[in-house]
Image (cartoon, helix red, strand yellow):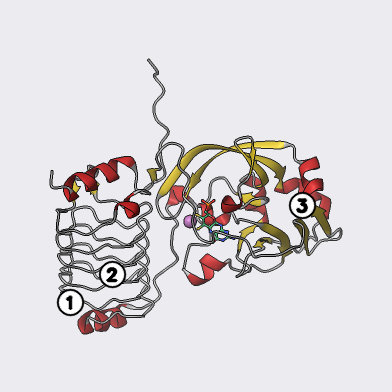
Amino acid sequence: MSTESPKPLPPGQQLVAPGKWPIIGERLPAQSDRPWTLEVGGLAQNVQTYSLAQLNEIANQSLLMDIHCVTRWSKLGVTFFGIPFKELMERAQVAPEAKFVSFVSRSERKHSTSLLINDAIELGTLIALQVDGQPLEQEHGGPIRNVVPGRYFYKSVKWLEKIEFLEHDRLGMWEAESGYHNTADPWREQRYMAPTIDKPTALKLIQSRDFSDRDLRSIDASDRDLANLNAKSAHLRDANFQGAILTDANFSSANLSNSHFEKSDLTRAQFVGADLEGANLCGADLRGADLTDASLIGASFFQTLPEELSAKIDSTTKISKTSLSPLTPEQQEYVLARLEGN
Ligand SMILES: Nc1nc2c(c(=O)[nH]1)N[C@H]1C(S)=C(S)[C@@H](COP(=O)(O)O)O[C@H]1N2
Ligand SMILES: [Mo]
């Protein structure tokens, strides 16, 4: 018998099913006939552009790391292979005033993320070409992505085309537009920066019961009476609805990534097409609720710790089976059994 104890997970994370690796964010690089290259430049004396063949030739390092996505799923023990960021940096002869590094994607929206150069080095950032002995698949950032151990996975861009050394930080796409934390240490649960609105404004909106189309990231609406709330297409990442009354509320097409609904009353609430990635629905009443086409990667419906909380789900709850497949096996089993009336 093995005496090895399971590896601890960072707070609020759960394991994906063995062999599963969700695709998050963009699914394809920008269409282009140009061959893949990697430019290492910005504030550097020896700006270089590497062809994919050159990168493969100098690739020399394996890196065993754990993936922690900000939407609460983790995948442990993935082996990447490629070139240490530090090595490319040394070759570039970076100017002393450079303090930050930006990793830029060949994607439609020129997706990027940034790190302090010192952090990028100390964490062991790798420019990866392979995973578990195979070339990286396109959907996971192939042929070239960076990977950063010890940071949420949004610091690892897919389809890396440029490494740029900077004197001042340039916030990445998720950091600037979704309010993701710029340090992103999963062990300190640095998921989001501070809320976007002050308390009096939040209170007014709560009284109006109209959140539609607004950016109310991290709003605290816990224990409020918000029956019939209109929150269509609202931006509600990290919002707190714990214990709130939300009967007949409409969250269709809302972004509710990492939101909290513990013990809330969601009877007949609408979540059609909503983003519920990483949302906590433990102990919520979901009878008559409609979650058709909602994205549920990393969402949870029951927990045993720190207290036992089980969502009320029955045959009147609408969740499509395909939406359930990215849940962890335990969560999936819990929901399915109740949908089928067991
Ligand atoms: N170009 C690009 N890189 C990206 C993203 C993206 O949308 N576009 N999303 C980030 C996020 S939030 C995560 S969790 C990981 C997901 O990588 P995966 O799809 O290989 O799991 O990629 C990161 N890098
Ligand atoms: Mo992510």
Could you say where residue 230 lies in the image, as x and y percent from the top left? 25, 78
At label 1, the amino acid type is: Asn
Q: Which residue is mark 1?
A: 228
Q: Which residue is mark 2?
A: 220
Q: Which mark is residue 255?
A: none
Give the spatial CA distance, label 1 vs label 2: 18 Å
Q: Nearer the viewer, mark 1 or mark 2?
A: 1
At label 3, the amino acid type is: Met
Q: Quadrant of residue 216?
A: bottom left
Q: Quadrant of residue 208?
A: bottom left
> Helix, strand or loop at disc 1?
loop
Q: Is residue 163 left or right of residue 301?
A: right
Give the spatial CA distance, label 3 vs label 1: 55 Å
Q: Is residue 13 left or right of residue 148?
A: left
Q: Which residue is mark 3?
A: 89
Could you say where residue 252 lies in the image, as x and y percent from the top left? 30, 72
Query: Is 227 above or below relative to 24?
Result: below
Q: Residues within 10 Å of mark 1 (few under 14, many from 20)?
A: some
Could you say where residue 96 lies in the image, as x and y percent from the top left? 78, 60
